[in-house]
């Protein structure tokens, strides 16, 4: 398997010389679309582990299966996908039983973006591989490998292999236009207009890609103008990015409040000019 980037992770995995030295419980942390599943597949292929996904609940039947395996298997648990499951805490408590007394032929890989949803007792007992940001050269290599014709500026906004491969040109234009429109015109918006933007964020576009692009634009505005209000908006947006994946969070409420706080920040910017 040819993997572009993530050299440190691949080197550390390759230092594990045999399956009996492979940690029973692994965490792969990183941004959405950064290649966490690719690293999982690399580990499974290297050690010839059968792959299976636990996508809803870790119950006694699955645990019994783990303890009765006759051939090695790696279970993938995407905690980000389970973050809205109200039984996530119980899920993790069951997972802790596996970590404390791992079966002979079973391994687990946990994929996660926000450590806020992860029990500390689990994080402390797992081997953690953290995805690193891709250089512009690596992003270009990924783009070329999939016959995509993104500019370097567009690659910076897309930021991850998944976005480079899957996002369409018109989608990127749409999200960039929305993000720029908010920065340029939010001071003119009333509450109903802010909430209409929220509806777009909730239904029409990829919220994570929007946040990535919006953060990039805010940073450019800040370093160009040195206006502290853009810095405040940047921090507010990064907090939104983290809080969207807190257990049982009301995302609609969160986005509503984010937009109203953002409007206030930009209102203050205009009034102080």
Image (cartoon, helix red, strand yellow):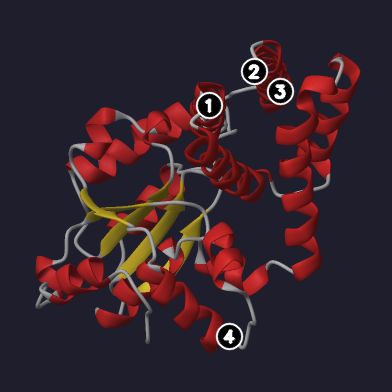
Q: Residue at x 70, y 34 (%)?
A: 183
Residue 227 at x, y = what percent?
53, 26
**Horizontal arrangement in the rendering, residue 106 relative to residue 138 (left or right):** left
Q: Which residue is denoted by mark 1 in the rendering? A: 227
Instruction: Please tell me how crowded label 3 is: few (under 14), some (14-19), or many (20+) other residues with Cα within 10 Å.
Output: many
Q: Nearer the viewer, mark 3 or mark 1?
A: 1
**Horizontal arrangement in the rendering, residue 125 relative to residue 44 (left or right):** left
Q: Secondary structure at mark 1?
A: loop
What is the C-alpha distance between the residues marked 3 and 2? 15 Å
Q: Which residue is denoted by mark 4 in the rendering? A: 146
Q: Is residue 155 positioned above or below 262 on the image?
A: below
Q: Which residue is denoted by mark 2 in the rendering? A: 269
Instruction: Please tell me how crowded label 4 is: few (under 14), some (14-19), or many (20+) other residues with Cα within 10 Å.
Output: few
Give the image quarter of residue 269.
top right
What is the C-alpha distance between the residues marked 4 and 1? 39 Å
Q: Which mark is residue 115?
A: none
Give the image quarter of residue 225.
top right
Residue 4 at x, y = what percent?
38, 79
Q: Is residue 154 positioned above or below 126 on the image?
A: below
Q: Which residue is denoted by mark 3 in the rendering? A: 259
Q: Residue at x 54, y 86 (%)?
A: 144
Q: Secondary structure at mark 4?
A: loop
């Amino acid at each position: 398997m040819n993997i572009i980037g993530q050299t440190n992770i691949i080197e550390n995995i390759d230092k594990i010389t045999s399956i009996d030295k492979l940690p029973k419980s692994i965490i792969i942390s990183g941004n959405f679309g950064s290649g966490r599943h690719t690293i999982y597949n690399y580990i499974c292929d290297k050690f010839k582990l059968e792959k299976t996904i636990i996508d809803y609940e870790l119950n006694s039947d699955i645990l019994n299966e783990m303890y009765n395996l006759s051939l090695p298997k790696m279970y993938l648990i995407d905690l980000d996908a389970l973050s809205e499951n109200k039984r996530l805490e119980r899920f993790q408590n069951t997972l802790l039983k596996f970590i404390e007394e791992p079966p002979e032929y079973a391994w687990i890989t946990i994929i996660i973006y926000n450590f806020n949803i992860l029990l500390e007792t689990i994080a402390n007992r797992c081997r953690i591989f953290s995805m690193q940001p891709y250089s512009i050269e690596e992003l270009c290599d990924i783009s070329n490998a999939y016959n995509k014709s993104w500019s370097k500026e567009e690659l910076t906004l897309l930021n991850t292999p998944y976005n480079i491969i899957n996002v369409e040109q018109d989608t990127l234009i749409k999200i960039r236009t929305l993000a720029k429109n908010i920065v340029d015109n939010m001071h003119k918006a009333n509450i109903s207009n802010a909430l209409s933007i929220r509806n777009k964020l909730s239904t029409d576009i990829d919220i994570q890609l929007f946040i990535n692009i919006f953060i990039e634009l805010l940073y450019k505005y800040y370093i160009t103008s040195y206006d502290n209000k853009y810095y405040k908006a940047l921090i507010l947006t990064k907090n939104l990015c983290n809080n969207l994946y807190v257990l049982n969070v009301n995302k609609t409420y969160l986005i509503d409040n984010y937009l109203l706080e953002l409007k206030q920040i930009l209102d203050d910017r205009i009034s102080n000019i």
